Image: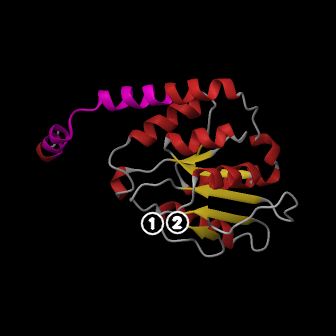
């Protein structure tokens, strides 16, 4: 239990951020959020499930929590920001919130390959997420979301959640299947191809 509570009568807009359960840090996102918060003192409450990443100054946070507590924090938030994994995306959508998504990138050792970028690009094109791949876009999306949180509310059709999760898994499998084996990618990088 985190001990963090988001009441229904919060005086400030609440942004909830989740980075998932991976052992990889996501300090790039933490820095972007810290800068955004610094520019809005006293204007927003941010709660972050930060995993092994550092907690941004100005935010409340915790490393991990149980699934039910995570879902309750999402339901009560005005805005949800998540990494590009299917779990956080589908959890947010199941709570009636269109998530702002920042995919992890392998070049910064945030994830093992670029599956999150490809997956999130596909979901953004389908209107299932709002995608932010750079700090300026994240700031603009957060500002718009805080100005009109209702714009990120979606209808929850619980009958389709299971199908969506199934399809998400299929899409990930398809994306991974298209990639050459890791040893071949390493050899190609070494040879300059």
Q: Does the CB distance between marks 1 and 2 fall below 8 Å?
A: yes
Residue placed under numbered mark 1 in the picture = 52
Task: Give residue 177's position: percent from left, percent from top.
Answer: 30, 28
SS class of the residue under badge 2? loop
Task: Give residue 129's position: percent from left, percent from top.
Answer: 62, 38
Residue placed under numbered mark 2 in the picture = 63
At horizontal 40% and vertical 50% (from top left) the residue drawn is: 105
SS class of the residue under badge 1? loop
At horizontal 50% and vertical 53% (from top left) the residue drawn is: 20
Task: Give residue 1's position: percent from left, percent from top.
Answer: 61, 65
Q: Note whether 1 is above or below 130 in the view shown.
A: below
Q: Quadrant of residue 73?
A: bottom right
Query: Magenta segment, which residues?
Result: 168-189
Q: Find out whether residue 186 is within the magenta segment.
A: yes
At horizontal 53% and vertical 63% (from top left) the residue drawn is: 50
Q: Quadrant of the C terminus?
A: top left
Q: Find out whether residue 151 is within the magenta segment.
A: no
Determine the main secondary structure of the stretch shown in magenta: helix
Task: Give residue 106's position: percent from left, percent from top.
Answer: 35, 51
Name the side, left or right, on which 86 lies relative to 112: right
Comes first in the chain, label 1 or label 2:
1
């Amino acid at each position: 239990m985190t001990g963090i509570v988001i009441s229904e009568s919060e005086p400030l807009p609440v942004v909830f951020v989740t980075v998932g359960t991976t052992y990889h840090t996501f300090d790039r996102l933490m820095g972007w959020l810290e800068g955004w918060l610094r520019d809005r003192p006293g204007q927003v409450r941010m709660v972050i499930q930060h995993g092994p990443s550092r907690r941004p100054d100005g935010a409340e946070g915790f490393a991990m929590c149980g699934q039910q507590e995570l879902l309750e924090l999402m339901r009560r938030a005005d805005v949800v920001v998540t990494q590009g994994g299917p779990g956080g995306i589908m959890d947010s959508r199941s709570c009636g919130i269109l998530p702002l998504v920042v995919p992890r990138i392998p070049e910064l050792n945030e994830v093992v390959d670029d599956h999150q970028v490809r997956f999130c690009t596909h979901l953004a094109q389908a209107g299932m997420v709002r995608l932010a791949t750079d700090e300026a876009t994240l700031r603009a999306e957060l500002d718009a979301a805080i100005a009109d949180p209702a714009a990120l509310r979606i209808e929850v059709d619980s009958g389709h959640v299971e199908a969506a999760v199934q399809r998400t898994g299929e899409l990930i499998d398809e994306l991974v299947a298209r990639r050459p084996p890791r040893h071949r990618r390493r050899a190609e990088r070494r040879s300059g191809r």
